[in-house]
Image (spheres, rainbow, N blue to C red):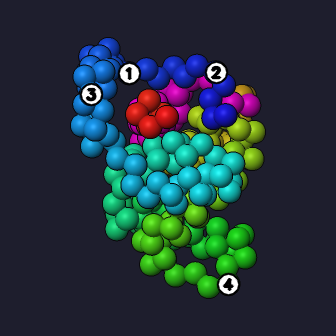
Amino acid sequence: MFFRRRSRISLPPVLFLLLVLLLVSGAGRAARAFYPLFYREIIFHYAREYNLDPYLIAAIIKTESNFNPRAASPKGALGLMQIMPKTGQWVAEEMGQAVFDPEQLFDPETNIRFGAWYLADLFREFQGDPVQVLAAYNGGRSNVKRWLAGEGQTRIKNIDRVPFPETRQFIRKVLWNYKVYKFLYR
């Protein structure tokens, strides 16, 4: 559903071997301790509602806040999925919510609902391309459009060509976490 082509991101051999050994030896619980799936019901509910892969949502939450609902970035992003208040206001309006207070972004259900809605919107805009969606989630949709136009491309073919180092690293971390979540929880 989420990835139809092979990702260029792979586990470093030592970490992959460690992960496999942990799972094969019956230490899957230990591996899951490093990759928890808190708020599972909420994640799966909104993944179904917005036709998203729940493990992608979990990977974004792991990357953005490590499942801390009170997380706040130095740039002002809030909650589990690190939503900027301005984005939260826009999402609330698009969803028909009359009143929005940025404090709502600290509520896990609200944050995951808004984050899932926003991801679904990005998937529509970027024709389902997960790398572009993740780049837009982190670096802004207008920046992704500008990068693509500047490259004369319709899609990001190489993560290394994304001009913001933070966004490149974000994409890599989410893709890594996505693979781990699928491996541990499917």
For the residues bearing labels 1 and 3, Cβ distance under 8 angstroms: no
Mark 4 / mark 2, whichever is N-terminal:
2
Q: Residue at x 54, y 22 (%)?
A: 7
Q: Which residue is mark 3?
A: 26
Distance from Cα at disc 1 to Cα at disc 3: 20 Å
Q: Earlier in the sequence, mark 1 or mark 4?
A: 1
In whole angstroms, how far apart are the C-alphas of marks 1 and 2?
16 Å
Q: Secondary structure at mark 2?
A: loop
Residue 39 x/y as whole percent: 44, 58
Residue 5 got which mark?
A: 2
Q: Amino acid at mark 1?
A: Leu
Residue wearing tag 1: 11
Residue 165 rendering spot, x and y as whole percentages? 42, 37
Residue 152, horizontal then vertical, whole percent: 72, 28
Q: Which residues are magenta?
A: 154-180
* Distance in Å between CA atoms under marks 3 and 2: 31 Å
Q: Is residue 43 above or below residue 13?
A: below
